[in-house]
Amino acid sequence: MCFTAIVDKVVRQLERLWWAPVEVLVFHAVSDLYDSRRNKRVDWSQTDVFKNHVRLLKSRYRFISLDEAGRRLRRWCPRRERLAVLTCDDGYASVLEVLPFLESERVPVTLFVNPKYLDGVSRREGYAEEPQYMTHDQLWALTSEWVTVGMHGYAHDDATVQTAEEFELSVERCVEALQRHPRYIPFFAYTWGRHTEATQRLLWQKGIVPVGVDGNTNRHYHGMIDRRPMDSHYWNKIWSKMTNER
Ligand SMILES: [Zn+2]
């Protein structure tokens, strides 16, 4: 093991003693029935199962918003309380159905959307049927204090295969499209969590917080916020990892 890896391991161990976990979770589509034409199995949860998982999380964690988590992860004072954050990627219209439930449970949620698909017509590759994304009007109707809106790339592109210019244009088009939303926050969830040092630097320069999905907990802010997938496909594995966290 090289010196930097040893130092990193020691730092992480010290962080475990100092700061309780901040679990940032991501889900995608939620609906009563699975429809293979509109969803992928790994990005879907059945509605009642999803609700049960949220209630289970509430029994162990206190939910806070993502921007509040960003502030708390930067603090140096010790944190003893286990916190959780709910985020939702891709902006599937089906998610609108569970927002009243989340508000009734007093669970804030951040929706990471791709502006290209808010027109109600454009479709991502791999989805055969009619558009399944929320529209611009539906997104702009979300003004609840329990919802915030962040960026997920303009068209769900992989940042690691885009050129630097393409990635910057994608970020700029996201900001342009979303910054006037009343619940906009400057957080950027990488598509599939894929990123490079260059994409990180660009977001930092623009004052945007990068958000990944490497499946780890957060203890302190190291330049990005990590997330764990909580769609049904991943739940058992992720829940077991979370309950083993000190
Ligand atoms: Zn996505």
Image (tube, rainbow, N blue to C red):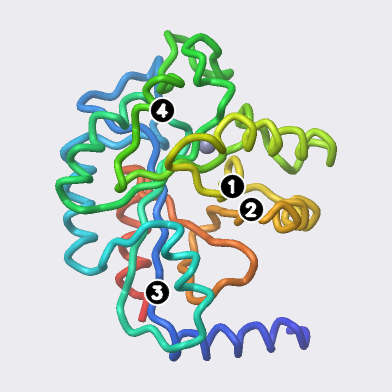
Amino acid type shown at disc 4: Trp
> Residue drawn 57% across and 54% down?
212
Identify whether 107 is placed above or below 88.
below
Quarter of image, res 169: top right
Q: CA distance from mark 3 to mark 1?
A: 21 Å
Q: Secondary structure at mark 2?
A: loop
Identify whether 113 is placed above or below 68.
above
Q: Earlier in the sequence, mark 3 or mark 1?
A: 3
Amino acid type shown at disc 1: Phe
Task: Tell me the mark number nearer the camera, choosing from 3 and 1.
Answer: 1
Do labels 2 and 1 touch, CB within 8 Å? yes
Q: Position of residue 240 (x, y in %)?
A: 32, 65
Q: CA distance from mark 3 to mark 2?
A: 23 Å
Task: Tell me the mark number nearer the camera, choosing from 2 and 1.
Answer: 2
Q: Position of residue 95 (x, y in %)?
A: 32, 32
Amino acid type shown at disc 2: Ile
> Residue drawn 51% across and 43% down?
150
Circle on res. 21:
3
Task: Tell me the mark number nearer the camera, choosing from 2 and 4.
Answer: 4
Classify 10 Å Cα crowding around label 2: few (below 14), some (14-19), many (20 and above).
Answer: many
Q: CA distance from mark 3 to mark 4?
A: 33 Å
Q: How many marks?
A: 4
Q: Earlier in the sequence, mark 3 or mark 4?
A: 3
Write down the residue under mark 4. Answer: 140
Amino acid type shown at disc 3: Pro
Q: Position of residue 168 (x, y in %)?
A: 77, 39
Write down the residue under mark 1. Answer: 188
Circle on res. 208:
2
Q: Earlier in the sequence, mark 2 or mark 1?
A: 1
Q: CA distance from mark 2 to mark 4?
A: 21 Å
